[in-house]
Image: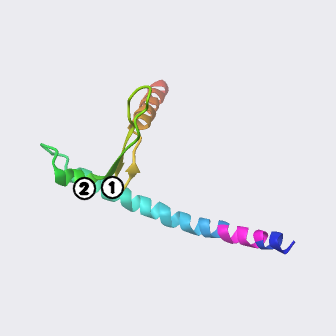
Amino acid sequence: MSHDYELEQSNPKSVAEVLRMEPKQQEQQKINAKAFVAAVKKYTDMQKLDATLLREFIDRIEVSHADRKTKTREITIVYNFIGAFDFARAIDEAQHTTKKQQKTA
């Protein structure tokens, strides 16, 4: 019974801790996004891709094990400041938003 009471008491504490951390994480995400945009603006007139540019934008590249049937691998690029970015999803969302705007116009 005392174990149940301890769980009840610790749960609100852990929920409160998570709620306290959330604004800090959101603020860090805003800072990271601003830093990413600043880096992008710095290279808007880029003529060639070089190692310096790659180091500034890319944290790491993850390559999965080969699929035995298709002999393909999944490659994930983890960017500095924003993490892994799902380009396919972003393109789908942009197309969906464009279609939605066209319907309302």
Q: Nearer the viewer, residue 68 or 103?
A: 68
Badge number at residue 56 = 2
Percent position of residue 97, x then y:
45, 33
Left or right of residue 44, residue 31 in this image: right
Q: Quadrant of the C terminus?
A: top left
Percent position of residue 49, x then y:
16, 45
State whether residue 48 is above or below residue 68. Answer: below
Q: Main secondary structure of the magenta part?
A: helix
How many marks the image carries: the answer is 2
State whether residue 42 is above or below residue 94. Answer: below
Disc 2 is placed on an element classified as helix
Residue drawn at x 49%, y 27% is 104
| Tag 1: amino acid | Asn
Q: Nearer the viewer, residue 53 or 95?
A: 53
Magenta stretch bounds: 7-14
Does the magenta segment cover residue 9? yes
Mark 2 to mark 1: distance in Å? 7 Å
Q: Quadrant of the N terminus?
A: bottom right
Q: Nearer the viewer, residue 99 or 9?
A: 9
* Colouring scheme, one of rainbow, by chain, secondary structure, one colour: rainbow
Q: Nearer the viewer, residue 46 or 52?
A: 52
Does the magenta segment cover residue 8? yes
Q: How many C-alpha atoms fall within 10 Å of the one at disc 2: few (<14), some, or many (≥20)?
A: some
Could you tell me if the residues under marks 2 and 1 are in contact, i.e. CB atoms within 8 Å? Answer: yes
Q: Which residue is mark 1?
A: 80
Q: Quadrant of residue 30?
A: bottom left
Q: How many C-alpha atoms fall within 10 Å of the one at disc 1: few (<14), some, or many (≥20)?
A: some
Percent position of residue 60, x then y:
33, 52
Residue drawn at x 72%, y 67% is 11
